[in-house]
Image (cartoon, grey):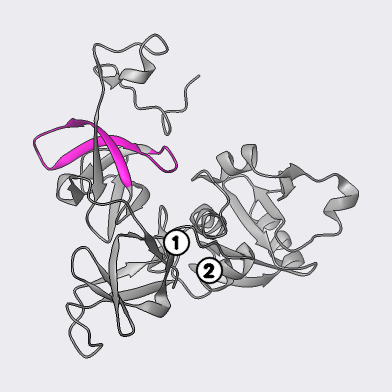
Amino acid sequence: MHDPRLTPARGDLAAKYLEGKVKAARFVVGETFEISEAIAPLRSAPSADAGLSTQALMGERVTIYDRNGEGFAWGQLNGDGYVGWLPDRALAKPGAAATHKVTAIRTFAFPGPSIKLPPVDTLVMGTALAVVREEGGFAVTRQNWYLPRRHVGGIDEMAKDFVAVAERFVGTPYLWGGKSSLGIDCSGLVQVALTAAGTGCPRDSDMQRDSLGRALDAAEAGRLQRGDLIFWNGHVAISRNADSIVHANAHHMATVIENTRDAIARIKAAGSEILTIKRM
């Protein structure tokens, strides 16, 4: 079975690379676009009311296979492979290759070299940027936006501790499908943190459970280490140490640091047992 979240295939249309693997009325090559909005919603259907599956950040590339003429385009994100509907307005022809990325959890883009100017936009961690020069304390992008240099790193710059990255999101509101400091869900937090540290990571918790790290046996699971991932059905948390976790969750409606035993007991009382613990 092909996972529809990662397979650009419908009864009427599918990606050309899937020809011979899936059934569809026609197959198309698709066209590469770049996300031009700070955060673009990728939805399960071509409607502003449809569920938020995930988000695409400015600078991300996406292959578009269909545009419905009513403001939505259907395609696959080139980064984590997620498939869904994006607003047409968020798509632009690809520009220069990214040279830098936002390393702060969020920052402002200014129209000139002054923090007193009204910002053009708010950009979030992981946003890909083509920086053309530095001017004073700013990195200047190809859009002629001025970003604080302290908030920008090279595209190949990686954080040393993905758990420390996740900890920076404490207090961020919970948002199903979110993956930024403006709103994030449990698997989004794991994906953003691991990506910042240079580890490829799928989007959803079941995908992460199936592909990341190695499963711990019962003895190892009793001695949690920093960076272990604890999986429940539909939820994931990151171990900070033997006694605490950091996770985005709907109980607190935020990213929080919580005592591990308390969290496990609370989630068990709500009807969910731990499925597995993976060590990165």
Q: Residues within 10 Å of mark 1 (few under 14, many from 20)?
A: many
Q: Would residue 228 appear left or right of 151 to someone viewing this image?
A: right
Residue 62 spot, x, y in % from top left: 30, 41
- Give the residue drawn at x 71%, y 48%: 273
| Residue identifier under label 1 | 184
* Residue at (53% x, 57% y) in the render: 186
Q: Nearer the viewer, residue 266 or 243?
A: 243
Q: Where is residue 242? Give x, y as percent.
A: 80, 67
Report how far apart the C-alphas of labels 2 and 1 lie in the structure. 8 Å
Q: Position of residue 97 (x, y in %)?
A: 31, 51
Residue type highlighted by circle 2: Thr
Report the residue marked by disc 2.
255
Whether 71 is among the magenta residues is: yes
178 versus 28 height, above or below: below
Q: Earlier in the sequence, mark 2 or mark 1?
A: 1
Q: Quadrant of residue 105?
A: bottom left
State left or right for residue 277 relative to residue 235: right
Eyeballing the image, is 242 above or below 86?
Answer: below
- Magenta-colored stretch includes residue 204: no
Q: Is residue 256 left or right of residue 35?
A: right
Q: Amino acid at mark 1?
A: Ile
Please determine whether, in this image, residue 225 is positioned above or below residue 168: above
Query: Where are the magenta residues, as a range?
Result: 61-82
Mark 2 touching mark 1, by CB under 8 A? yes
Please name the residue shown 37% across and 67% down the image: 124
Q: Residue furthest bottom?
A: 116
* Disc 2 secondary structure class: strand
Mark 2: give few (<14), some (14-19) or many (20+) Cα within 10 Å.
Answer: many
Dot 1 lies on which element? strand
Residue 276 vs residue 131, the one in the foreground: 131
Quadrant in the rendering for residue 264: bottom right
